[in-house]
Amino acid sequence: MNPFLPALLALATLSVAVVPSQSPAERLAASSLSFDPTTLRYDQPATGTLWAANAHYKLGFEHAGSRFVPFLSSSASRSWSFAQRLVEVRVGETALHHRADGDEVAMLRDADVVDLRHSADLVERWHLRAEGAEQTFVVQALPSRDGPLVVTLDVDTDFEVAPAVDGGFLLESPDGAARISAAVAYDAAGRRCAVEGRWLDGRLEYTVPPDFVATARLPLVIDPVLRQQVLSQVTYLVQADVAYVADRELTAVVAFRPYSAVDGDVFAAFLDAAGVVQVWLWIDVSTADWKEPRVAAVRNPAQFLCIASVLDPTSGKHFIRGRYIDYPSSYVLQPPFDIAGVSATDKRLPDVGGDSSGLGIARFCTVWEETTSTGDRDVYYRFLDRAGNGGVRAPLAASAAYDDHRPRISATRETHYPGDLGEWLVVFERTLHAADTDIYAQRVRFDGALVGSPIAVATTAAVESYPAVSSPTGDIDGHRYHLVVYQRDARGNGDWDIHAKLLEHGAVLREIDVSGLEPFFATREQIRPTVAATEARFLVGWNELYITGGGDYDVFLMSLHLTGSGASLQLGAAEARQPIALRPTPELDPQIASFWEGGADGAPDAVVVDSFEVNSSTHALDVTWLRGSYGSDSTVVTLPHGCGFPITYQGEAWLGSRMTIQVPGTGGTFATSGLLLGLSRAQPIPLCGSCLLGVDGDAYPSTVYLDLPTEGSLLGATIGAQGYDLVGGSCFGRIRVSDTLEITLR
């Protein structure tokens, strides 16, 4: 029996009350991501198509026309748009321009100015500003000055169009409104006049008076302005995911902005090691409905793949699309492509795994769930190379006998075994009936082949759901491990806890009740776990309900580690739970990317992203970089209390591991040296010079083996160890003591 164990357990009761729990990680940097309403960002997903957007509106250009979509609210029933296309410009009875179907219109952008060049003499110029878009028609030459100048546009809109008192137009909907200002005309001499605007059932017509046309110095400009008109807005940034590339110290965050109930946008933000946003990119900002974005990375050179489910408005089915973001030296956004196209099944909840090996033959593996017309859900996958080529859509877990859904894949594939190009691990839910959902896993080889059959990970009679899976650890005594985490309703009363299973090559080795490691908090509802591997540990995050019956969820993180091997292999807590996001408003859906999974050798650091409620109408994102105190900071601190007597130790104070503490033994029948173990202190010893008594505790032999139990209540406890020798010292002519080891249990 460990001679120190009884004292240690007794000490735990006292130390938890008087010693602050140690944080598992140091915050390196933190950023809050939300939309800057003043900044316009652009996306050109295909030739001839351009979208611009900020927090107030988005404006698309394609097919020689424009589509103005004001942001009314994330909770709006739909996106309300106003599309227009120039049909004709005439002076009196003489045509300056008449558009025919198929006519090409050149589109040019210079910063926040977009030109649609209808002819050499006619340019439709858009000045895009923070609060709205200013549309102008620039006339360089007139075929005649006999009569009014009339500009006619075809309009396709969901809004009700009504005249405004200022001569412009109101664009009205049940979800909010926009407006078109009264137009004016001005010439090169600076003269101005009012322009009559008329709404003609699907056409918009602007008329410049003939007397102004007759004397105008060219160019002549007609100038209306489109802008939103809404008293309040609700905007959310949710469904965030994160990936990391060590070679560039680059973090990618993707998230979903519901523009309305049927129009979702997806953006990506790329941040440096200091947490500074280097660039924002729209993955999609069109009127298509993108949602559920996920991101993964490959190295050398860095490339990210963002995938999402997209609604096909014709069939009402979702399909899976993706976009590559290359980073050889600057950010290059590739055109979108279909990963799993429109079909009879509804495809949702995608995920993607990358490759941190840096071998130059990197691939991605994508997974998603599909629902058939009968309601059966199955899991499918497809692997891709850097160019979007690779295997075809194939079933990963598809059987009419089971309902398989909600897949998640490891962030990177395993590439550590000689001659083995590695594999990803996919986890998913398997529902047998409403009261019994289990967790299964499936191995996918680098070439796209499935390895074996689905693996039963958690199959109790309780409901187990929302699985997540880490990448493999580094080499631990010749082994590498995945950790699968999930939420479990063991008592069937909605009191969810976080559980974890340790896997190696598909074999389930160990189980741990993560919530039970700290019993004081185990009664709180803990849901939506996430996990990442470091070289030798696992980082587990989750949402935790602050007060039962309330709606305030916070984000917590705990570090787990492995000790022993073979039959004695143990999985336990390495560092105490730490609040990553702790506000009086909810923080939701955390995701973790460790530096190890991004290709950093041995780095214990990680980045965590979550969505938080700024107020009742706004959600933004938290991005937090963490440096694990394990690795660079020891769990043992040496305090300079001694006077000439050495003390040594081996190991670290991790729960579930062994520490050895030793001072020189004196031998003989009566040992005169030993160890004091107990609470740390710093008490001067009278008449002993610089010697300090560093421990208030009991005496033990000169060598002590501390087999630290996996007991969550011990996390953060601090104990002291000091050696003593009753002969050969100068204190009182014979006593000497060592420095004090202050040991924090993690």
Image: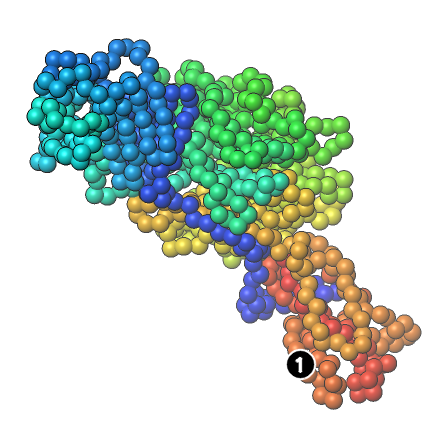
Q: Quadrant of residue 174?
A: top left
Residue displayed at 48% across by 29% down: 333
Q: Quadrant of the C terminus?
A: bottom right
Question: Is 397 displayed left or right of 697 in the figure?
Answer: left
Q: Is residue 265 above or below residue 546?
A: above
The structure's colour scheme is rainbow
Task: In this rendered view, identify the residue nearer to me: 403 or 484.
Answer: 484
Q: Quadrant of residue 638?
A: bottom right
**Mark 1 residue crowding within 10 angstroms, few (<14) / some (14–19) / many (20+):** few
Q: Secondary structure at mark 1?
A: strand
Q: In this rendering, is residue 685 above or below 77? A: below
Of all residues, the one furthest to the bottom in this rendering is 687
Horizontal side of residue 4 vs 715, given as left or right: right
For the question of whether residue 686 can be seen, the reply is yes
The N terminus lies in which quarter of the figure? bottom right
Q: Residue at x 83, y 82 (%)?
A: 729
As drawn, 745 above or below 116: below
Residue 464 lies left or right of residue 709; in this view the side is: left
Which of the pair 354/29 is nearer the observer?
29
Q: Which residue is mark 1?
A: 683
* Residue 674 screen position, x and y as percent: 80, 73
Q: Quadrant of residue 210?
A: top left
Of all residues shown, which one is farthest toward the top?
A: 101
Amino acid type assigned to the residue bearing label 1 in the image? Gln
Q: Position of residue 289 (x, y in %)?
A: 36, 27
Residue that sits furthest to the right in the current view: 668
Percent across and percent down for residue 208 are 12, 25
Is residue 513 visible to us here? Answer: no
x, y (%) of residue 532? 58, 42
Q: Nearer the viewer, residue 42 or 540?
A: 42
Residue drawn 72% across and 65% down? 4
